[in-house]
Structures are given as structure tokens and as C-alpha cells.
Image (spheres, helix red, strand yellow):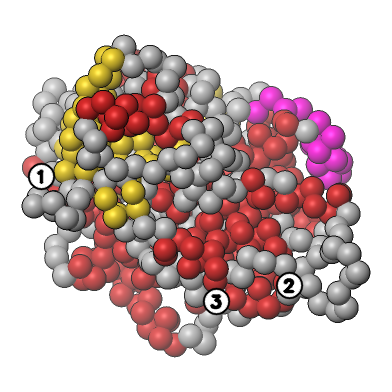
């Protein structure tokens, strides 16, 4: 299947490893990425721009949706935050035809019009819904037997459930656990998996943000997790980048690698860790990779 | 149908003061509510179980508890909707982020203190009218959602910031503040903004949407907090990390079409905030070593002039 690829700001910024892992994984999963159509698409606003001007955020996202429509390919995201902000914008745009028409007025000059058919989908959902878990399993060359993985969704891919279409797609609630199990991992369940990582207040209230990192990583670690896996690069940035701060705040070792979803898939699909830049994390993945029992 | 209730028990006056789960099994109608079950436990199985409830109709807001880990009113949570994930077991715990007095009963004192802190009463100025203060219907319409709050505490229970910071005013109090800021009869908005701009105010929310999801009355506290952020900035309070963050984020998208992460971090803390800049050094070194740094030169997206034009068009509409 072919998708109009929306990489988001972070995979082109502080998380280049997410970009490269995605490209590699999609190649093996026969997901053809249209990397051209959304090259001129803007940031979603991440909910921050929306604090200043909600309509502005909706217009920018309608522009991206119109570009995807024009390409004829469904839109694929790889960031929980991009996904959530797009889904919420789409819900508002589709709920009110007059609103959509007035937004389209502002897109006219560029020759764009959002007709209302975009259905932005995170790679996680694409795997669970469009490709199917059976298909994923058929492509696995290395079952990650013995790997204990704590899922960490990121707020925007679990709430608000209405905008995210959870009622129509009930599998979305457990999609990450499903993927973890299908690659041979063991799910380490913990209550923090759908809570906030603290990233949005990183520069506003660093103490609270680091406390959130500490709570989640320590809880998962104490429940036996070898690593945490997330479909959200913002969660990754905070849980990985600020884990040393969390460890010193709690005066204990944590040492829990934070793996991007495509990196986890890549390990099972036989992509080399170096290619997915697993050696480029703040919390080292070295021990994890050396201990990984890979069985064909 | 056979239902197993797994209820969190705690009694500071008993010999066993450690919180623990206790199981109760009984035959229930699938259409009955979690509250029906809890009342039956208390009346038919175990009279020592303490819980709060009154109207049984989602009006009084007394029976907020956590059902399967998520806050809600026990009286409008159906058994059949609570069983889906855990087979025939329903886990019930007291509301979070408030001290437990006994079993499912929590102490609301900290909740009321925060509500009181936002001065939830009208503060009009000028001469008192001869009759009551009147407000045109159309000016009150936007408050219809927020006045539906029944002060049940579900949003406070599941607030992810209150979990780590008891100083945060929290979703219930901030939504209440929005209700008065937005009331045309109130004249103290500027003073209210000053309080909301302080530590523990609007900027400490993480935008996790937990409060929006668990509120049984559609108050959408987080959306109110975001609206307050906009108003606080518009009223001139821009000298906070939060306001700088929102402004710089927007500027970055306006000028290049996407986010300049380096600049955002520096500008949010404030470039002359020496302590924060020094504090960033270890992170910068760690990130450099791992190769996790955004490109040195932040290039604009192709066709950025179209994004800028949208900004100009939409910003002038405000």
C-alpha cells in the first residue's frame, strides 16, 4: 500500500533515528512511502500553536489534508502527537461544513481545497488495521523471545477517544501491546502507559516533567521491563533524554532504554541496530542488544 | 450475570491499616451500575464498606471513584461497560490525588481549597444595580458546558500533574476560574489572570486530556485551561516560560513552516536565564554525543510563503 508520509518535525530534528528506522521498516513491510506530496506540509501545531489560535491550527492541518487528498494516498504519521492533533482538527473540520468552507477560503490562493476525505493514520494503526498482525508476523525473521517490553503510548494517540475513532476501531486501545506480542516480546503492563511523559512542560516546569519521567521509567523497570517502546518521539525525547535527571533526582539507577516503535519492528524484521541508529540513544541500548535472545 | 468486584479497602482505625483489595462476588443485572453493586455489597455482604453517594442520577457528584483505573461516577458507569477488558472483574478504587479517609471515601478539603483559591464568585465593579446583575443570554452561551460541572472531582482524581505536584490548581479549579473570567458581569478578569499566570496556574497543565476524557459532564477542563492561556497572554502576561514557549513555537512555524527545536528550548527558558542555560549544558552534551541534535541550520519547508500567507490571513481575523 502507498501512503503520503508525514514525518513530523521531530523525526527530522532531534530524532533522526526514528526517520531512518521508519524508512527501513516500511520497505520490508511493503509500505510504499510517498515522501514528496507532503514535503511542503507544515507542523501540526502540536497543540501549542492551538493555544494561541485554534483556527490557525485547523487551517494549517486542513492544508496538509488537502495535499494528501491531492496525492490520492492516505496520510501516514509516525508521531502520537501529530496523530492526535490531526485527528482533533479533522473532527472539528468535518463537524461543521460552514467552518470547513471558510477554512477552504484561506487555502484557495494556493489552489488547495480540503474535501473532507483524509483519514490520518499512525504507522501503529496501519500495521494493526491495514496490514494486519498476521501480515506482520509473516515478515518476522527474528522473534524477540524473552524481551520484556513496557508500552508507552503518548497522550495524543489515546485521548480524546472520540476524535481518535476508538469506538469504530476498538483495537486501537491495545494496538501497541498487540504489536509487542506479535514480534515475540512480553508485555510489561503498568498504569503509566497511557499517562503523560511530561514533555509538554519540559521548559515550563522541569521539576514536574522530570518527576513524570522518573515515575514511569522506575515503575516499568521495577515491574521487570528490559525496555520501553513508544510510538511517540516526544515521549521518547523526554523519557530517554531526561532519564539521567530522573535517576539523579531519585538517587537510583534506572537504565531503561526507550525504543521507537519502528526500531522494535526493525529488530524483529532483521534490520541491523546500527541502521536504525539504536546506538544513538541517550540511555544506552548496548546491554539490551547484547542480551537479546534472537531466535529465527 | 456473575460479577466479581475487586474493591480497594483501607481503614485507618482497624488493626490492619494497610490498603488492600477485597473481592466480592455476586449475581448482577448487566444493565445495572457500579454504584448498584457497591450499595449491594454494603447492604447485603459487608456493612463495613464505606462509600459516598446520594442522588444515583449523575447530578450530585458524590460517587466519583476509579473504575478499572479510570475516574468516573459509579452511578453512571454500567456494569456491562466495565467488564469488557477484565472478564467478569470490576476493580473499584477511591478517587486519586486526594487523601483517603476510609475505603472509597476521600477527603475533599484540598479540592475545596483550590476551588476557593480561584475566588469562584462574581466580582462586579461600579454601582450596584437596583435589581439583580443581568447578563444577555448570548453572552452566557459559551459557559453552558463549564457550568455543568458538578464538582465530583473525577478530573482532579486523574490529573497527571496533580500526581506529581500538589501546588497545581488543577482542572476543576481552573475550569471554575474560566467560568468567572468569561462571565460578562465579572470585572476582575485582570486580577484573575495575574493569579492564573503564577506557578501552579494555567501553565503547569501538560495538555494530557485526561480531565477531558474522564469528566462525566462534558466540562472539558483542559480546553478551558487552553482558552485561559490565550487570554492570559492577550492580557499582557507574556513573561513566563509558558507564554514564551507558545509564542516561539508559533513564530517558528510561521517563519519556517516547522519547528526549530533548538531555538524553542532556548527562547522558552529565556536566553538571559543564565541558570537555565547552564542547566541545559549536560543535556546538550549528552545529545551531541548521541547524535540526537536537530540540524545546525534550520531550513524552511518548500513553499513556506503559503504558510506565512495563511498566518497573515487567519491572524487578522482574530
Q: Which image quarter: residue A41?
A: top right
Query: Is disc 3 in the same subunit as disc 1?
Result: no
**Nearest to the observer: residue B38 or residue B143:** B38
**How many residues crowd mark 1 within 10 Å: few (<14), some (14–19), many (20+)?**
few
Q: Nearer the viewer, residue B304 or A184?
A: A184
* Residue A266 visible in the shown view: no
* Residue marked by disc 2: B123
Q: Residue at x 36, y 58 (%)?
A: B107
Q: Identify the image quadrant of residue A262.
A: top left
Chain for disc number 1: A
Which label sits in the foreground, 1 or 2? 2
In the rendered structure, the answer to whether residue A187 lies left or right of residue B85 reads left
Q: Position of residue A89 (x, y in %)?
A: 65, 40
Instruction: Identify the magenta region.
Output: A97-118
Asked which secondary structure carries label 2, the reply is loop
Q: Which residue is mark 1?
A: A290
Query: Looking at the image, do the residues carrying marks 3 and 1 touch, with CB atoms under 8 Å apart?
Result: no
Amino acid at each position: 500500500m502507498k501512503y503520503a508520509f508525514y514525518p513530523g518535525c521531530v523525526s527530522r530534528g532531534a530524532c533522526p533515528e526514528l526517520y531512518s528506522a521508519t524508512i527501513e521498516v516500511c520497505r520490508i513491510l511493503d509500505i510504499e512511502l510517498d515522501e514528496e506530496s507532503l514535503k511542503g506540509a507544515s507542523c501540526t501545531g502540536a497543540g501549542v500553536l492551538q493555544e494561541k489560535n485554534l483556527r490557525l491550527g485547523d487551517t494549517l492541518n486542513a492544508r496538509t489534508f488537502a495535499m494528501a487528498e491531492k496525492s490520492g494516498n492516505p496520510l501516514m504519521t509516525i508521531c502520537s502527537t501529530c496523530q492526535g492533533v490531526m485527528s482533533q482538527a479533522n473532527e472539528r473540520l468535518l463537524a461543521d461544513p460552514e467552518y470547513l468552507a471558510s477554512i477552504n477560503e484561506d487555502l484557495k490562493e494556493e489552489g488547495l481545497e480540503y474535501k473532507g476525505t483524509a483519514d490520518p493514520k499512525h504507522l501503529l494503526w496501519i500495521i494493526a488495521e491495514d496490514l494486519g498482525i498476521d501480515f506482520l508476523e509473516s515478515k518476522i525473521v527474528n522473534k524477540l523471545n524473552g524481551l520484556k517490553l513496557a508500552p508507552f503510548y503518548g497522550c495524543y494517540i489515546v485521548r480524546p477517544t472520540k476524535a481518535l475513532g476508538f469506538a469504530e476501531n476498538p483495537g486501537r486501545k491495545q494496538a501497541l501491546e498487540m504489536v509487542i506480542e506479535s514480534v515475540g516480546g512480553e508485555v510489561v503492563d503498568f498504569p503509566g502507559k497511557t499517562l503523560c511523559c511530561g514533555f509538554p512542560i519540559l521548559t515550563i516546569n522541569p521539576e514536574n516533567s522530570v518527576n513524570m519521567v522518573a515515575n514511569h521509567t522506575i515503575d516499568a523497570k521495577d515491574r521487570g521491563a528490559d525496555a520501553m517502546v513508544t510510538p511517540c518521539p516526544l515521549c521518547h525525547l523526554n523519557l530517554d533524554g531526561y532519564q539521567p535527571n530522573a535517576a539523579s533526582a531519585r538517587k537510583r539507577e534506572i537504565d531503561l532504554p526507550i525504543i521507537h516503535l519502528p526500531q522494535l519492528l526493525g529488530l524483529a524484521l532483521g534490520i541491523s541496530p546500527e541502521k536504525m541508529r539504536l546506538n544513538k540513544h541517550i540511555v544506552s541500548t548496548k546491554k539490551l542488544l547484547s542480551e537479546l535472545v534472537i531466535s529465527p | 450475570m456473575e460479577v466479581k468486584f475487586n474493591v480497594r479497602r483501607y481503614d485507618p482505625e482497624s488493626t490492619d491499616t494497610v490498603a488492600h483489595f477485597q473481592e466480592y462476588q455476586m449475581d448482577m443485572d448487566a444493565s445495572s451500575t457500579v454504584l448498584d453493586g457497591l450499595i449491594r455489597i454494603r447492604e447485603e455482604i459487608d456493612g463495613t464498606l464505606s462509600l459516598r453517594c446520594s442522588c444515583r442520577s449523575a447530578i450530585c457528584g458524590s460517587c466519583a471513584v476509579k473504575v478499572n483505573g479510570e475516574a468516573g461516577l459509579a452511578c453512571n458507569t454500567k456494569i456491562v461497560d466495565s467488564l469488557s477488558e477484565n472478564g467478569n472483574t470490576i476493580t473499584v478504587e477511591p478517587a486519586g490525588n486526594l487523601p483517603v479517609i476510609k475505603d472509597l471515601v476521600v477527603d475533599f478539603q484540598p479540592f475545596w481549597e483550590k476551588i476557593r483559591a480561584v475566588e469562584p464568585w462574581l466580582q462586579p465593579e461600579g454601582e450596584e444595580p437596583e435589581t439583580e446583575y443581568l447578563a444577555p443570554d448570548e453572552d452566557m452561551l459559551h459557559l453552558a458546558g463549564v457550568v455543568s460541572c458538578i464538582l465530583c472531582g473525577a478530573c482532579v482524581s486523574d490529573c497527571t500533574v496533580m500526581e506529581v505536584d500538589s501546588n497545581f490548581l488543577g482542572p476543576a479549579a481552573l475550569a471554575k476560574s474560566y467560568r468567572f473570567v468569561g462571565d460578562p458581569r465579572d470585572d476582575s478578569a485582570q486580577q484573575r489572570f495575574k493569579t492564573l499566570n503564577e506557578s501552579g496556574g494555567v501553565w503547569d497543565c501538560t495538555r494530557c486530556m485526561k480531565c477531558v476524557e474522564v469528566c462525566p459532564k462534558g466540562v472539558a477542563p483542559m480546553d478551558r485551561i487552553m482558552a485561559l492561556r490565550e487570554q492570559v497572554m492577550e492580557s499582557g502576561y507574556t513573561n513566563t516560560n509558558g507564554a514564551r514557549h507558545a509564542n516561539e513555537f508559533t513564530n517558528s512555524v510561521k517563519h519556517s513552516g516547522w519547528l526549530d527545536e533548538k531555538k524553542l528550548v532556548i527562547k522558552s527558558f529565556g536566553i538571559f536565564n543564565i541558570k537555565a542555560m547552564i542547566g541545559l549544558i549536560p543535556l546538550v552534551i549528552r545529545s551531541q554525543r548521541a547524535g540526537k541534535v536537530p540540524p545546525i541550520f534550520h531550513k524552511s519547508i518548500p513553499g513556506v510563503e503559503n504558510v506565512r500567507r495563511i498566518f497573515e490571513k487567519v491572524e487578522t481575523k482574530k
